[in-house]
Amino acid sequence: MTAKRNPWKLVLRIIVGIFFVYGLAVAVGVSVGYFVAKDNAAHQVTSILVPQQQIAESMPPMNPAPAPMQPSASEVTHAEPGTTPVAAPVEHAPPVAASTPTIAAAPPKGWRENAISMPPYAYRDKKLIAIIFDDAGVNAKRTKEIIDVKSPLTISFLPYAPNLQRQVNAARAGGHEVMAHVPMEAEDVDAHPGPNALMTDMTDEEILASLHENLDKWNSYIGINNHMGSLFTADAHRIGLVLAEIKRRDLIFVDSMTSPKSIAAKKAQELGILTGARDVFLDDVDNTDNIKLEFKKLEKAARKHGTAIAIGHPRANTITALKEWLVAVENSEYMVVPLSVVLLERQKNTGEKHN
Ligand SMILES: [Zn+2]
């Protein structure tokens, strides 16, 4: 004898089944959404230093950290250095109607593309110091020692250095900003700035061709500063020509101040370029006692003006003195920051004065 099947029981089972499957799908969706959001949030808070373009695109933090911390270069995150994003081939691209409006390619981002930015709360009440290491890349071993420093430095590479892009990529991955150290003519005829140097006896076309040679074979720099150039940076017409091209490319210019007669920083400012001039040469005299004195001068300049820019070179004494100084000023009123942060802060203060 078989029990009579109740058709309503079957319908009920199907309905319960549908609800069960639907509920399971919702639960999975919510879980995945939660973890993706959590992951994104983690990426946003793990770093004080982020690339300039990310800062511009993201909202300011709602709950700023109570106490600013000395940033570590290793905390820096930015786009994969030296790589141009290449679109992955799309195998089954949806057909696009001829009338669909296309979005124009974004204009070049200039210095912002490669700058490392910091939210203002990270350096509130601090005296900001940028340290540029000139002549980088030629001595790969010393350059590596600079790259390994765990504070955000600014490393200015000679464009004729061997394995240039590889070294630059390492510098970027180490959390440092990169500059092009463009060779220019010195007053001293015995000083040789190197290949593709900008010289005062060149025609305008030759100067621009040399500048292109210096800048177009590599990437990831935020701007340029002059290698030597005591004669060239005092030549209004010729340095003006270079600065007009820097302006066109929306790059930063720093006057190394190899001559008191240099008019480069002043001209750059007139052109509206994000610019600054070196305050202290750390190692004009290559011994640690003198370099320590220069670090004191650097502190004094930063105390007086709120910001200061130093230039040093990848030499044993300078690196030793730098490391000692970094330990000494940890958690002090001084803070080592990327060059672009100092220049932006100066620009802000200049604007306030004029307004
Ligand atoms: Zn130099």
Image: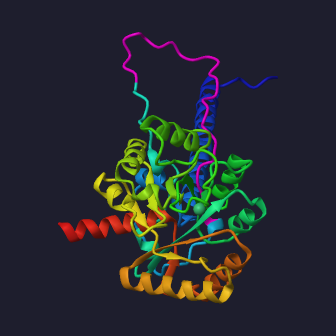
Residue lying at 33% horizontally and 64% vertically, measured from the top left: 347
Which of the 4 image quadrants contains residue 302?
bottom left
Residue 244, percent from left and from top: 37, 45
Residue sitting nearer the eye, 10 or 49: 49
User: Which residues fall within the magenta stretch?
Assistant: 75-102
Residue 69 visible (yes or no): yes
Prevalent SS, magenta region: loop
Q: How many marks?
A: 0
* Residue 343 vertical position relative to residue 4 in the rendered view, above or below: below
* Residue 229 vertical position relative to residue 151 in the rendered view, above or below: above
Residue lying at 43% horizontally and 30% vertically, measured from the top left: 105
Which of the 4 image quadrants contains residue 282?
bottom right
**Is 49 inside the magenta-drawn segment?**
no
Q: Is residue 180 left or right of residue 200?
A: right
Residue sitting nearer the eye, 127 or 145: 145
Residue lying at 42% horizontally and 70% vertically, measured from the top left: 63
Residue 103, percent from left and from top: 40, 26
Residue sitting nearer the eye, 139 or 150: 139
Residue lying at 40% horizontally and 27% vertically, measured from the top left: 104
Q: Quadrant of the C terminus?
A: bottom left
**Is 101 inside the magenta-drawn segment?**
yes
Residue 254, percent from left and from top: 45, 61
Which of the 4 image quadrants contains residue 261?
bottom left
Quadrant where ligand 1 appears = bottom right
Residue 60 visible (yes or no): no
Residue 102, percent from left and from top: 40, 22
Residue sitting nearer the eye, 181 or 73: 181
Residue with the most extreme top position: 98
Residue with the most extreme right position: 1
